[in-house]
Amino acid sequence: MFDRVMMVDWSGGNDRGPRPTRDAIWIGETGRAPVYCRNRQTAEDLLSKRITDALAAGARLMVGFDFPFGYPVGMAQAICGGGVLDLWDWLEARIEDTPRANNRFDLAGGINLSLGTPGPFWGNGLKRDVPGLARTKAGYANPFDDRRVCETRSRGTFTVWQLAGAGSVGSQVLMGLPVLARLRQRFPVSVWPFEPVDAPVVFTEVWPGLIEPVVRTTEGIRDAVQVDLLAHGIGRLNPDRLEAMLAVEVPDARTEEGWILGLGFEEELQDICR
């Protein structure tokens, strides 16, 4: 079904320096050792090169990213007046990102203000105050669900609305979706589960927590271990088993939220990733 599989452990923070470290971006691929990327610009360049290489070789490629592809129901329509992939483009047009700084907190505060509520985003990680964005959840109100359905069915996940502190996956989403939007504009990409997986390149959402028992018994930098195990494990799956994972039925009303590849297949994933 796929000739190559890549897995990406993302980061919403700034440049992490030249020395490979944890809590940074790591990219794993079948047949290759994991690669450390010190910032999102380096990661986007490497992803572009790997995708270009796969297309030139006539290979089908799956790329999994460890951050949510969508928000709880209603977010996309409320913010951009369109669907989930329209929201990707909306964010790409507004996020400003350099290795040392970005505007994710200001954009999140602006979204809160536009909705007229002290939410949905929270967690200002800057020293200065950000209009519309609280530092904590004190006085917090969210016009949307706190979690997506898939997050209520998997252990260890975090809410997409938290932008700072431990488990601030919300920053990864705001800084990751614009990169995916640009890659989608440049290359023939299908985004699962929003589109049929018939393009040469398919983007999927993954959650390394599904293979946590394997990860915690494997030595090395955790981020690198996760992408290495997932890339090589999913790359070894029989095509019919991977097809079954991709064919999972997402609740109709929740399709716009996205889904985690392998959710409900945890034991099978753990076995193939050992």
Image (cartoon, helix red, strand yellow):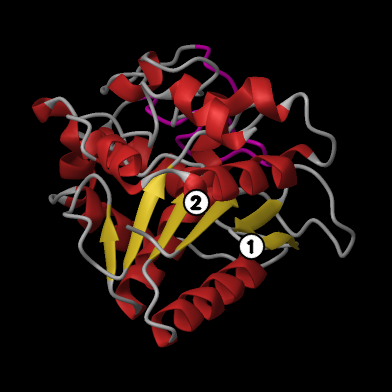
Amino acid type of the residue that numbered disc 2 sits on in the rendered structure: Gly
Left or right? Give the position of 218 relative to 179: right
Q: Is residue 167 above or below residue 85?
A: above
- All told, the count of numbered labels is 2
Badge 2 element: helix
Residue occupying image coordinates x 18% and y 40%:
78
Note whether residue 105 is visible. no
Of labels 2 and 1, earlier in sequence is: 1
Residue 271: where, in percent of width, then height? 56, 27
Asked whether, in this view, residue 95 is left or right of residue 18, the answer is left
Tell me where the magenta segment starts and ends, as one range: 118-138
Whether residue 265 sits left or right of residue 269 in the image: it is: left
Residue 235: mark in rendering: 2
The one nearer the camera, 252 or 273, is 273
Q: Is residue 97 visible?
A: yes
Return the mark for residue 31: 1
Q: Amino acid at mark 1?
A: Gly
Q: Do tag 2 and tag 1 residues touch (Cβ < 8 Å)?
A: yes
List x then y, in percent, for residue 145: 29, 19
Q: Residues within 10 Å of mark 1 (few under 14, many from 20)?
A: few
Check if residue 117 falls in the magenta segment. Answer: no
The vertical placement of 156 against 223, above or below, is above
Mark 2–mark 1 Cα distance, whole angstroms, equals 9 Å
- Choose between 168 and 204: the one closer to the eye: 204
Q: Residue 23 versus residue 232: which sits nearer the camera?
A: 232
Q: Relative to 4, does residue 216 appear above or below in the rendering?
A: above
